[in-house]
Image: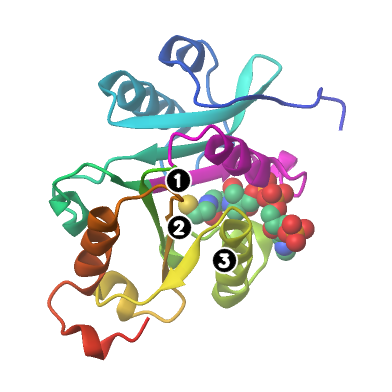
Amino acid sequence: MTATEPVLCTICPADKLAAHPFHPDLNIFRPPERQHEALVKLVKSERGLVSTAFTGGQTVAYAAFQLPDPFECWSKDPSGKIWELGAVEVVPAWRGHGLAGRLLQETFASGFFDDKVVIAQLLSWHYDTRRTGLSTFAYRELLIKLYQKVGFQLWRTDDPDIAGHIENALMARIGPAASAETVRCFHRLRRQGRAPWDIPF
Ligand SMILES: CC(C)(COP(=O)(O)OP(=O)(O)OC[C@H]1O[C@@H](n2cnc3c(N)ncnc32)[C@H](O)[C@@H]1OP(=O)(O)O)[C@@H](O)C(=O)NCCC(=O)NCCS
């Protein structure tokens, strides 16, 4: 690897994010230029934040957090304290160097999420099984381990996108200063239509 070690930009300002185009291989979720544009827009809207890693003038990794989209059940939280870890992506050439872990650790160390609940929906259709050669179950375990290191836990849900697919999972990080009301709201929303006794944890 000849490229210099990426430099992290934790909770990156919109202008700095805009000045660093996405590496062409940051293409898991959308074409890189569209994802870059969408994330700059998200940061400007103040409905999200993005931590990034740059090298050679390009963005090679990012973690994006956002308030849930209005069509998601999570947006029914009236306090605005339930956020979502929308995406974490590292270019294949830089994977396995601890970048994803460091981006998450440093973002949570900022304290911004201390009073919030951050959910992460592990959805197998986002897993890069093709390039990693991992099965969907091994990939799920990789993500669970990665997220557990920064305080996420597994939670049951009756969300059909998750409950109907055992290779998917719901995780959430309950911030150390999250209010009882926010935590209650998280538990209510993860259960949606079902009675609490159907979902023991
Ligand atoms: C998942 C992803 C973000 C991990 O990024 P990364 O920078 O390689 O992750 P890290 O180097 O911090 O490693 C995290 C853990 O995963 C393990 N890991 C990473 N790649 C692996 C692989 N191909 N096979 C097995 N384990 C792997 C690491 O060993 C590490 O575990 P450890 O701390 O016990 O050593 C990256 O693979 C990626 O961009 N995937 C495509 C997008 C995606 O799936 N995003 C997550 C859902 S939104």
Q: Secondary structure at mark 3?
A: helix
- Judge whether residue 55 is colored magenta: no
Residues at marks 1 and 2 touching, judged by CB atoms closer than 8 Å: yes
**What label sits on residue 144 in the rendered view?**
3
- Report if residue 111 is visible in the image: yes
Is the residue 135 above or below the residue 106 in the image? below
Does label 3 or label 1 sit earlier along the sequence? 1
x and y, in percent, of residue 52 in the image? 57, 29
**View quadrant of ligand 1:** bottom right
Q: Quadrant of the C terminus?
A: bottom left
Find residue 87 and name its label: 1
105 displayed left or right of 80: right
Residue bounds of the magenta highlight = 85-113
Residue 23 visible somewhere in the drawing:
no
Mark 2 sits on what residue?
Answer: 126
Badge 2 density bin: few <14, some 14–19, many ≥20, Cα 10 Å = few
* Residue behind label 2 places its C-beta within 8 angstroms of ligand 1: yes
Q: Residue at x 22, y 74 (%)?
A: 191
Residue reaching furthest to the right? 2
Which is closer to the viewer, label 3 or label 1? 3
Taking the spot 38% from the left edge, 28% from the top edge, the residue there is: 39
* Marks 1 and 2, the one that precedes in the sequence: 1
What amino acid is found at the position of numbered circle 1 in the picture? Ala
Query: Does residue 34 lie above or below 109 as drawn?
Result: above
Q: Position of residue 15 (x, y in %)?
A: 44, 9
Q: Residue at x 24, y 63 (%)?
A: 184
Q: Which is more toward the observer, 60 or 27?
A: 60
